[in-house]
Image: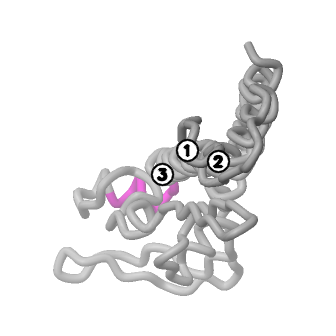
Amino acid sequence: MGRSKAKGGLYDVGNKTFRKQLSKKQKDLYMLAEMFPVETKVMLTEIGEASKEEMQRIIRESVSPWGEFRISAGLGGKGPGRYDTGLMHDSVTYVTEQAKDRVSVRVGWVRNFEDYFGYQEGGFKNWYTLGGFINNRPWFRRMPTPVDQEGIFALRNSRMLAVQLMGEKVNQFIAKFKKIADGK
């Protein structure tokens, strides 16, 4: 995006062409208008990536009684918590979308969602406990009363991080554009 004088008295500013010569301030303001959606998309992409990483960190580090038992009993899994097969962890992603007058980012299980992701996220009533092993495979028995299984709240907590980052990025964004608009 540059400024250049075209033939015949026309002046180009970004993707706009004008018949009269514009002042430096006017040109800068037109450039800002063109930069705004691009800069916004960059900002939201950075927020999306940070939120995705936060969700995945929470999933990896969230310990559950079953996860601890699974690891101590040598039953496999990728960690002592909700990071068992890796499907819930690896399904976390973000999508930045840009329409004509809007830029947005969606973070979470955007492309792949299994019901159990929701149970792990928000918590659930667990009716089953380990009953024992048959041929080195666990079997579960139903309990007479359920036990509350606390959620990991990875989506909620990554959303809180996104709001915090948005505040920081918007302040940087405003300072940057104010500096350009002031001609500095």
Q: Residue at x 71, y 33 (%)?
A: 169
Q: Is residue 4 left or right of residue 162?
A: left
Q: Residue at x 48, y 62 (%)?
A: 92
Q: Residue at x 75, y 29 (%)?
A: 177
Circle 2 or circle 3, nearest the eye: 2
Q: How many marks?
A: 3
SS class of the residue under badge 2? Answer: loop
Residue 137 is at least partly visible in this image: yes
- Percent of width and height locating residue 184: 73, 13
Q: Amino acid at mark 2?
A: Leu
Sooner in the amino-acid sequence: mark 1 or mark 3: 1
SS class of the residue under badge 3? Answer: helix
In this orientation, which residue lies closer to the viewer: 171 or 39? 39
- Percent of width and height locating residue 168: 75, 30
Query: In the rendered structure, does residue 153 fall within the stretch colored magenta?
Result: no
Report, in whole angstroms, how far the alpha carbon at label 1 lies from the one at label 2: 5 Å
Q: Which residue is mark 3?
A: 56
123 over 116 or under it: above or below: above
**Magenta residues, as a range?**
64-70
Report, in whole angstroms, how far the alpha carbon at label 2 lies from the one at label 3: 53 Å
52 over 11 or under it: above or below: below
The quarter of the picture where residue 66 lies is: bottom left
Q: Amino acid at mark 3?
A: Gln
Report, in whole angstroms, how far the alpha carbon at label 1 lies from the one at label 3: 51 Å
Q: Amino acid at mark 1?
A: Ala
Q: Which residue is mark 2?
A: 10
The quarter of the picture where residue 164 lies is: top right
Sooner in the amino-acid sequence: mark 2 or mark 3: 2
Q: Are marks 1 and 2 in contact (CB under 8 Å)?
A: yes
Q: Which residue is mark 1?
A: 6
